[in-house]
């Protein structure tokens, strides 16, 4: 199929490359010329494992190209909109400038029957507001939220754990969940089979999306057709749940800190209950990135607009707990040097908001580094991938590429991004041979505390004795 993808950031660039890799003819469109140049040359403008290979393949095969010219969207059957929805500068709500600009820019090039599939994370109600503009052009708007995790984005796009398509005009309760791929039925024959499907633009659009995602559909990935509002909510609800799970365990870490309990053992123990599960119970410096923090704030802001602020008022608490953990990591460093932080050399291991990413948006790691510098510490930051981005945002910090160079002479080590380079490949003995002090603060509870202690280190975890 012919597809266009508007917006070539973390979401759109991966989506375009992944769709080309499963056989579609894809054009990626973005206003940023530098990004388009890099992508056209088969280079990923950000770090995402597996993406450069897909870009090179697609560009070489000729079924993947990138442009700044919106008119090249003309002729595509499905137009994915994957532009950013950042937090507004003066509030918590999502800034929809880019979504509106993408839709307005696309409208002149739509043909009757085209599908516009929103992927950006938007406040519930946005799609219903946009739909009439798209329908005036004879096209159909659907909302098809994206659940990819940075660092695993290629895999999550090609082989997602579920597909959700929100369509207009679906009467209440008539959404479908279908375990696809049951039997050998060909999706295109199914598409043409039913008269109702042909007549109803929403159902027709859902069928077309099924064809877009044919490999995942064929292997039985759950494919849920909902109304527009539900599809929008699925995304924010999922992120709100994940953020709440992390803040829950971090709240337990706060209790553990005053009782002498160990939050990692607590997480293991409650995580064995299959109703709870161990994933996303990693206590530490908390969540960051371009999604969870801004999505829970935008959700709370939207709920307030809808007169339902009390329904998600707990999200303010989730946010507050999360931000307190950043402060706690800083306090641990200050306490480790008995309050005498001015002039102390602190090496911060990690700048990205999580490993396998160079994304520093709302990164707890950099937040802690900046606060420590503000307290007078001599801070050096290292990271395998995120230094260039970090330097642009916080030029006042010292950056050292090489991990061992960064560690040399440190009084305190603060681990804040659990890259393998730090949690697996750095032995406490080797680290001790480089640093001046033997104080380590493990902001991700990912080091073997007893091994570090045995090597002569004073180890400080988050929510651990
Ligand atoms: C998230 C969602 O997982 C994804 O489905 C959605 O599409 C976008 O937002 P992402 O931001 O890439 O993805 O990162 P994720 O892996 O969810 O981690 C978010 C943050 O939570 C990171 O800072 C991570 O370090 C932190 N985290 C995660 C914890 O602090 N503890 C955990 O147990 C898990």
Image (cartoon, grey):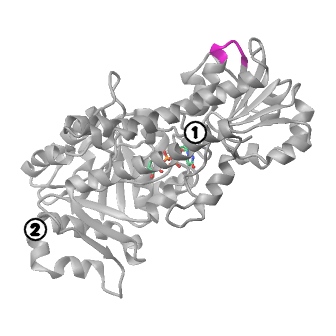
Whether residue 11 is visible to the viewer of this picture, yes or no, is yes
Q: Give the vertical position of 54 relative to 397 (above or below).
A: below
Q: Position of residue 389 (x, y in %)?
A: 57, 30
Tag on residue 358?
1
Upstream in the sequence, badge 2 or badge 1? 2
Q: Identify the residue position indicated by label 2 in the image.
A: 200
In the rendered view of the protein, which quadrant contains the C terminus? top right
Q: Position of residue 420 (x, y in %)?
A: 72, 48
Q: Which residues are magenta?
A: 373-378
Mark 1 secondary-structure assignment: loop
Q: Residue furthest bottom?
A: 183
Q: CA distance from mark 2 to mark 1?
A: 43 Å
Q: Nearer the viewer, residue 253 or 214?
A: 253
Left or right, residue 244 beside residue 31: right
Residue 376 part of the magenta segment: yes
SS under mark 2: loop
Q: How many marks?
A: 2
């Amino acid at each position: 199929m012919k597809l266009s993808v508007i917006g070539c950031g973390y979401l759109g660039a991966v989506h375009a490359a992944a769709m080309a890799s499963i056989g579609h003819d894809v054009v990626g469109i973005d206003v940023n010329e530098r990004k388009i140049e890099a992508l056209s040359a088969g280079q990923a403008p950000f770090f995402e494992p597996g993406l450069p290979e897909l870009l090179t393949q697609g560009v070489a095969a000729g079924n993947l190209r990138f442009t700044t010219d919106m008119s090249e969207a003309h002729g595509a059957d499905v137009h994915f909109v994957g532009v950013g929805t950042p937090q507004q500068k003066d509030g918590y709500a999502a800034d929809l400038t880019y979504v509106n600009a993408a839709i307005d820019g696309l409208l002149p090039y739509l043909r009757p029957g085209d599908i516009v599939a929103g992927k950006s994370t938007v406040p519930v109600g946005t799609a219903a507001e946009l739909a009439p503009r798209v329908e005036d052009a004879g096209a159909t708007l659907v909302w098809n939220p994206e659940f990819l995790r940075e660092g695993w984005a290629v895999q999550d796009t090609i082989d997602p754990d579920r597909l959700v398509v929100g369509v207009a005009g679906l009467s209440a309760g008539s959404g479908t969940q279908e375990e696809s791929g049951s039997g050998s039925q060909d999706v295109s024959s199914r598409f043409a089979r039913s008269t109702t499907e042909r007549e109803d633009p929403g159902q027709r659009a859902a069928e077309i999306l099924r064809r877009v995602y044919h490999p995942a559909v064929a292997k039985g990935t759950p494919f849920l057709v909902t109304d527009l509002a539900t599809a929008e909510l699925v995304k924010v609800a999922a992120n709100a749940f994940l953020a709440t799970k992390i803040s829950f365990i971090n709240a337990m870490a706060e209790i553990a800190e005053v009782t002498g309990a160990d939050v990692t053992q607590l997480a293991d123990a409650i995580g064995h209950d299959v109703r709870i599960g161990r994933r996303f119970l990693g206590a530490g410096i908390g969540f960051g990135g371009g999604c969870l923090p801004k999505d829970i704030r935008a959700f709370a802001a939207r709920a307030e607009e809808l007169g339902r602020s009390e329904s998600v008022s707990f999200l303010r608490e989730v946010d507050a707990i999360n931000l307190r953990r950043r402060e706690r990591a800083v306090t641990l460093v200050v306490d480790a040097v008995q309050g005498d932080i001015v002039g102390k050399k602190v090496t911060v291991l990690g700048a990205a908001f999580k490993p396998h990413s160079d994304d520093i948006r709302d990164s707890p790691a950099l937040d802690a580094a900046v606060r420590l510098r503000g307290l007078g510490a001599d801070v050096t930051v290292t990271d395998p991938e995120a230094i260039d981005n970090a330097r642009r945002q916080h030029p006042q910090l010292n950056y050292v590429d090489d991990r061992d160079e960064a560690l040399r002479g440190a009084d305190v080590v603060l681990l804040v991004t659990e890259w393998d380079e730090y949690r697996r490949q750095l032995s406490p003995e080797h680290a001790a041979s480089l640093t001046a002090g033997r104080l380590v603060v493990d902001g991700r509870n990912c080091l073997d505390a007893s091994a570090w202690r045995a090597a002569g280190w004073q180890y400080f975890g988050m929510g651990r004795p």
